[in-house]
Amino acid sequence: MNLSIFVLSDPKAGEEALGRVFNALAVARESLEKGDDVALVFQGAGTRWPAELAKVGHPARELYDSVRACVAGASRACSVVFGAEAGVKAAGLGTLSNNAVPGTPGLASIRAAVADGRTTLVF
């Protein structure tokens, strides 16, 4: 299976957001274990997650570390809008900008994943 997972939840939104990112990471891990091609993308307010997940003691840090190899990056424009540029960079992630939205430096394209025939999940 070819799988793209987009995380849009905002870590500032509390328990529900934690549940969303945790489930996104869990499906990424399960899919990797089954030999699937997985691309995990942080988009929207979700671009704030890499900095949070890198914190010592974060409840999802170990799970995040286990799927780190499949992280494709973070949406460039979203990381700018949501003030997450430094956190994305500190986490060692690249930015994605293959959706040229006017007035922005470009977003990660969800449509491109779908058009490529990838099963696409949004959390």
Image: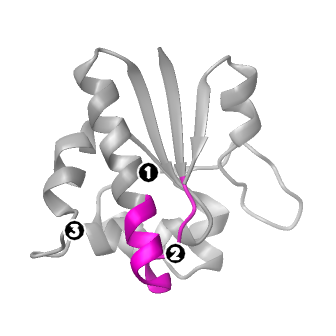
The spot of residue 26 in percent (x, y) is 31, 44
In the rendered structure, does residue 64 fall within the stretch colored magenta? no
- Residue depth check, mark 2 versus mark 1: number of the one nearer the observer: 2
Q: Quadrant of residue 76?
A: bottom right
How far apart are labels 3 and 1 at the CA level? Answer: 15 Å
The image shows residue 111, relative to residue 68, as above or below, that is: above
Report the side of 65 relative to 31 (left or right): left
Residue at the (40%, 60%) spot, across then down: 21
Q: Which residue is mark 1?
A: 94
Mark 3 residue type: Ala
**Region rendered in magenta:** 7-20
Q: Is disc 2 placed on a helix, strand or loop? A: loop
Q: Nearer the viewer, residue 93 or 28?
A: 28
Instruction: Say which residue label 2 marks.
Output: 10
Q: Which residue is mark 3?
A: 54
Between the C-alphas of marks 3 and 2, the distance is 15 Å
Q: At 81% from the left edge and 49% from the top edge, which residue is drawn?
A: 100
The reply to whether residue 93 is visible in this rendering is: no
Q: Is residue 96 visible?
A: yes
- Element marked by disc 3: loop
Q: Position of residue 57 (x, y in %)?
A: 10, 76
Q: Residues within 10 Å of mark 2 (few under 14, many from 20)?
A: many
Q: Could you tell me which residue is drawn at 71 percent across and 27 percent down?
A: 114
Q: Amino acid at mark 1?
A: Gly
Magenta stretch: dominant SS?
helix
